[in-house]
Amino acid sequence: MASVILKTENLCVGYPKTDVLTGVDLCLMRGETVGLIGLNGAGKTTLIKTLLGLRKKKSGGFSMDVDHGEGAGEYSNGLAYLPEKFEPPAFLTGYEFIDFSLKVYGRKVDRDAVRLAVHDMAFDMKFLDQRVSSYSKGMRQKIGLLATVMTGCSLMILDEPMSGLDPFSRSLVKDLIKAEKEKGASFLISSHVLSDMEEICDKIAIIDGGGVHFFGLAEDFVKSSGADSLERAFMNLILHNR
């Protein structure tokens, strides 16, 4: 039976004189993928930073259980985070960045495993030993994603993981997330690409106007709106609230 890995209860986050989000109630089960959906400025990144301890909550609470528990598969203790504006150190090579990231979590680097992982992400192998400063935006994003996943953490928070990726690479990332989830990993993902969220997320949280308007199955949200897609259902909600 799956256990809760992340839960918020009536959480309020924001700035000293301004609330960004209030009454946030979310529950992420071990082995699930939950997607945060909202317009720019809706509070998705602020919520993520609060969960990471980078911003103080104003009221309410949240809890995480990132210990290796039942149903965790091969995933170990810990929380890994890929920020929205991800920029790996330019002076490192791609391999050195992955090596550094894994050592932070006490994991040994297997060069063959790294080469297999980058190959599966359609990353040109010749760049693995070149400095990140020579990488395109998409290549830097792939290295960040691979380093995050290879930490083996039980919970991974990805803020706009598809940023800078072409359609083919996005498809590979979706396959990667699905595969890691099958092994026991849990994901909290923020993204503007609603078609991707509809495909990979077990549940979604629709954030608008300072609160969570819906939390549950994407298909239930679409049905309740009378729309034919998550994108159209989300648009209907936004237009209705304006």
Image: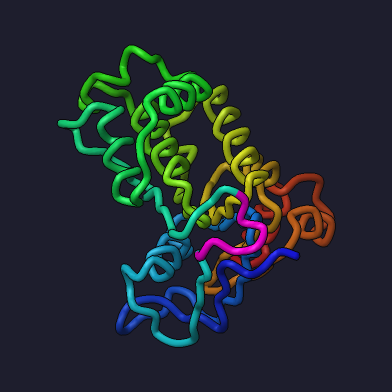
Position in image of residue 18 (x %, y %): 36, 80
Tell me, yes or no, whether the highlighted magenta stretch contains residue 171: no
- Residue lying at the far bottom of the rendered structure: 59
Q: Residue at the location (54% across, 61% down)?
A: 68
Predominant SS along the magenta part: loop
Against 151, residue 55 (above or below) is: below
For the record, the magenta segment spans 67-73
Q: Could you tell me how many numbered marks the image carries?
A: 0
**Above-or-below relation of 88 to 104:** above
Q: Residue at x 20, y 31 (%)?
A: 92
Residue 119 place in picture, x, y as percent: 48, 19
The quadrant of the rendering that contains the C terminus is bottom right
**Percent coordinates x, y for residue 53 in the rendering:** 35, 70
Indicate whether 65 appears above or below 144: below
Residue 33's x, y, as percent?
Answer: 63, 53
Residue depicted at x 61% and y 71%? 26
For the residue pair 229 and 87, the one nearer the viewer reads as: 87
Quarter of the figure that contains the N terminus: bottom right
Q: Is residue 224 above or below residue 195?
A: below
Q: Residue furthest left?
A: 91
State the residue lying farthest toward the top.
126
Quadrant position of residue 240: bottom right
